[in-house]
Image (spheres, rainbow, N blue to C red):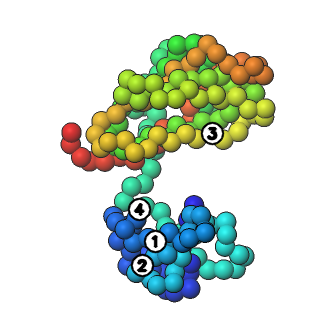
Amino acid sequence: MLALEGRMPNPGRRLDWDRLSASLTPVAGRPFTYRVKEFGDALLRPLHEFERGEPYYVYFDPARPWTRIAGQDVQFSPEWKHVAGGLHVSAQPGAWIEHSFRGTAIRWVGRKFDDGGTAKVMLDGRQVETIDLYASGRNLFFQRDFKDLAPGIHTIRIVVQPEKHAESRGQFVNLIRFEAILDDTRP
């Protein structure tokens, strides 16, 4: 995460967010550090580099917030169960979850467990990744973002796989929720 030095009044209103990269010049010898042309000496640099008490500004894109997808809008094959903690779980190979949305990104939020399995992730009918939900602990936060999708309608499908991590005590795959960056473009 990058932050802008805060030695001036909040400059966020003066930045052209749609063409931000055109306003930045890399600083030689300082990875992930940029000079902001409009502000002279102001630097955009990694948040972890700021010293305690040093002022800075962090910006989030308010035009493209993540939207929580309602559970009733997600389709589950019959092998899925809803359990405590808001989890939907299945250990049955071939069990699937699917959601179609109009947008440019989708996020899978779940948990990792010591009995976690693996899941194949499909976007628009193409396999994009296999995810392992095994962890040596239990109930550990998991999130995977799929970004930079072309504007329009997309479908994500998560399919439980028969394979699992060698140390896993099970094959459970889970979903707490999907979130998406939605758009209102028309294909």
What residue sits right under mark 1 in the picture? 25
Q: Quadrant of the C terminus?
A: top left
User: x and y percent of residue 176 in the render?
Assistant: 57, 35
Q: Distance between the residues labelled 4 and 3?
A: 24 Å
User: x and y percent of residue 156 in the render?
Assistant: 42, 30
Labels 4 and 2: the sequence-earlier one: 2
Give yes or no for contact between labels 1 and 2 (Cβ–Cβ under 8 Å). Answer: yes
Q: Nearer the observer, disc 1 or disc 4?
A: 1
Q: Nearer the observer, disc 2 or disc 3?
A: 2
- Helix, strand or loop at label 3? It is strand
Q: Quadrant of the N terminus?
A: bottom right
What residue sits right under mark 2 in the picture? 37
- Helix, strand or loop at label 4? It is loop
What residue sits right under mark 3 in the picture? 142
Give yes or no for contact between labels 4 and 3 (Cβ–Cβ under 8 Å). Answer: no
What residue sits right under mark 4 in the picture? 62
Give yes or no for contact between labels 2 and 3 (Cβ–Cβ under 8 Å). Answer: no
Relative to the observer, which residue lies in front, 73 or 134?
Answer: 134
User: x and y percent of residue 7 in the render?
Assistant: 56, 85
Relative to the observer, which residue lies in front, 98 or 165?
Answer: 165
What's the residue at 50%, 42% (across, down)? 145
Left or right relative to 43: residue 115: right
